[in-house]
Amino acid sequence: MTPILIDSSVIASLEHDPGTNVLKVVFRTGRVYEYFLVQKSVVEELLHAESAGEYFNKNIRNNYRCREVIAE
């Protein structure tokens, strides 16, 4: 997966694996989360949203199972 840089004050970049529908979100804070079963259409809407952070908070954050990725 290739990271997609986001013009957002909250999100630095994201990656989506269409095979597994895992969305990896890197926040500007440096924290990284993986969200599971996120459809490509949702990712496309996020990429085209007027505010990526607002779209993420409303449509992804509490609507998909996730886990924090801890650097080893």
Image: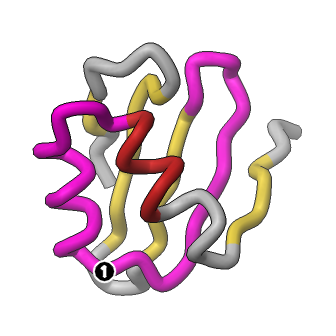
Q: Using residue 8 as the reference point, say whether residue 10 is left or right of it.
A: right
Q: Who's the residue at 52% across and 48% down the image? A: 57
Mark 1, secondary structure of its residue: loop
Examine the image and state in which quarter residue 8 appears. Answer: top left
Examine the image and state in which quarter residue 43 appears. Answer: bottom left
Q: Who's the residue at 11% across and 44% down the image? A: 48
Bin the neighbour count of mark 1 within 10 Å (Cα to Cα): few under 14, some 14-19, many 20 and up.
Answer: some
Examine the image and state in which quarter residue 3 appears. Answer: top left
| Residue 36, x across and y down, in percent | 56, 77
| Residue 2, x across and y down, in percent | 28, 45
Q: Who's the residue at 18% across and 58% down the image? A: 45
Q: What residue did someone put label 1 on? A: 39
- Magenta segment: 27-52
Figure quadrant of the N terminus: bottom left
Q: Who's the residue at 58% across and 29% down the image? A: 27
Q: In terms of depth relative to the viewer, which is nearer, 58 or 21?
A: 58
Q: In terms of depth relative to the viewer, which is nearer, 44 or 15?
A: 44
| Residue 39, x across and y down, in percent | 31, 80
Tell me the kind of residue under disc 1. Answer: Gln
| Residue 21, x across and y down, in percent | 39, 79
Total numbered labels placed on residues in the image: 1
32 in magenta: yes
Figure quadrant of the C terminus: top right
Colouring of the image: secondary structure
Q: Using residue 1 as the reference point, say whether residue 9 is left or right of it.
A: right
